[in-house]
Each structure stands twice: as C-alpha cells, then as structure tokens.
Amino acid sequence: MGYHEWDRKVNAGEDYSNGYYGAGLLLQYSPFQRFVLSADALVGRTFDATVLINAIPGLNPTTTLDLGASTLYKVGLSGDYAITPIIHVNAGAEWVGFDYGISPVANGILEPSSHTHDVVFMVGAGIAFGGLFAP
C-alpha cells in the first residue's frame, strides 16, 4: 500500500493525490559477501484519485475533482553493501506508471485523462540490528 501526492505549480496550484495497493515480487541475489542486489516489481490499483484545483479569484472557486482508478505498475533495482555488520549503504532506482482518468465537469472545469510516469533515484545509509554480514 502507498500514497502519491503531486503539488503542481500551475495557475493558482493543483494538488493531485491517490492511494494505491498491489502485490509484488522481490528477488535478491548476493554475488559476493556483504553485497546484495535486489529487483522488485509490483502490479496494483490506484484509489481515491483526486485533483484539488485552487481558486483563482474572480475566475473559479476551489474545486476537487474525482479522477477514477487505474492500474499501477512499479519496477525497481537496488544494491546494498554492508560496510560493517551494522553500517550499510545502498542505492537504487524505481519506475512507476499509472493513469488519471477524465473527471466529471464541476464549476465549469474538466480535467482530461493523463499518464504519469515517475523515475525515482535513491541513495541511503542504514543501521542493521543483530546478525552478520550478508551471505
């Protein structure tokens, strides 16, 4: 499960948001001691997708539009290296794709359907509690 929010800086501002749920698969492989490669994939569904269009004085009131549900896809690759049994560093990338549907007309506003594709790059450090190095 997860949540996505996008604060779009157009006009007086538009705030897109949706929840999502899905099922996925995680594959991990350790080519050498202390290092683990991971690949993951998820197929799911969005829910409660909306856009809140902020008011432009004299033109339109603040309006919230329903954008429907759609299929969501995620795929990712990452690596984790154990510097010590406790300290880890990691990096990865994730691609996400889903759609927003066409909205009903409200206050004279219609939001067209659209496709969203995001690529996220991640770098981090972690602390492990207990256990030894990765195999």
Image: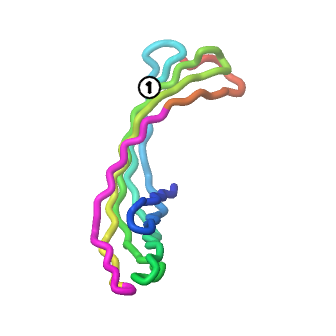
Q: Is residue 28 visible?
A: no
The residue at the far bottom in this view is: 107
Q: Secondary structure at mark 1?
A: strand
Q: Is residue 80 visible?
A: yes
Asked which quadrant contains residue 83, the reply is top right
- Residue at image mark 1: 37
Give, as a single range, the part of the protein colored magenta: 106-122
Residue extending furthest toward the right = 130
In the image, is residue 113 part of the stretch drawn in magenta? yes
Residue 16: percent from the left, percent from the top? 44, 64
Q: Amino acid at mark 1?
A: Leu
Residue at 53% in and 20% down: 81
Crowding near pointer 1: few (<14 within 10 Å), some, many (20+)? Answer: some
Q: Position of residue 128 (x, y in %)?
A: 66, 27
Who is closer to the viewer here, 86 or 89? Answer: 89
Most foreground residue, 66 or 73: 66
Q: Is residue 92 above or below residue 73?
A: above
Q: Residue at x 34, y 85 (%)?
A: 108
Taking the image as shown, residue 113 lies to the left or right of residue 107, namely: left
Split into 4 quadrants, where in the image is the C terminus?
A: top right
- Residue with the most extreme front position: 58
